[in-house]
Image (tube, helix red, strand yellow):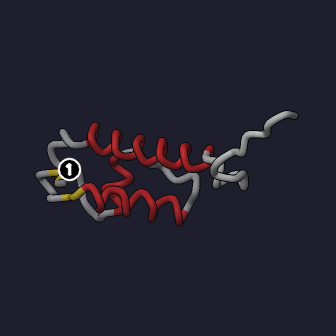
Amino acid sequence: MIVCQCNVIKRNEIRSAVFSILAADPSGRLEPQYIYRELQKRGRCCSCFPLVASIVEEMLNEATKAIDSPIFNGAPAKASLSRGA
């Protein structure tokens, strides 16, 4: 899916840039202008910036869910029910 018509930037490129920023600095800034800088692009009309921000938010929500998952925390994926305890 193309996110930015002006620069022809796709959703997967935005996601890759976010991963790249965070790999270089886990506290890296994830505002659209920094993502575009990582892609070596510049915002032109900037009407895509809200969509870029929502993609970042979606990625952070995915990461939060992964961290909260039982598998990540070392717990079994399915909790067994004890009977007669």
Counting from the top left corner in percent of width and height, residue 21 is at 46, 60
Counting from the top left corner in percent of width and height, residue 12 is at 29, 60
Relative to 30, 42 lies left or right? left
What residue is shown at x 31% (from left), y 63% (from top)?
39
Q: Residue furthest left?
A: 5
Which quadrant would the C terminus be assigned to in this image? top right
Kindly identify which residue carries mark 1.
3
Relative to 84, 29 lies left or right? left
Q: Secondary structure at mark 1?
A: strand
Q: Residue furthest right?
A: 85
What residue is shown at x 21% (from left), y 43% (from top)?
48
Counting from the top left corner in percent of width and height, residue 16 is at 37, 63
Q: How many marks?
A: 1
In this rendering, the answer to whether 66 lies above or below 37 is: above
| Residue 15 figure quarter | bottom left
What residue is shown at x 65% (from left), y 54% (from top)?
72
Q: Amino acid at mark 1?
A: Val
In this rendering, the answer to whether 49 lies above or below 9 is: above
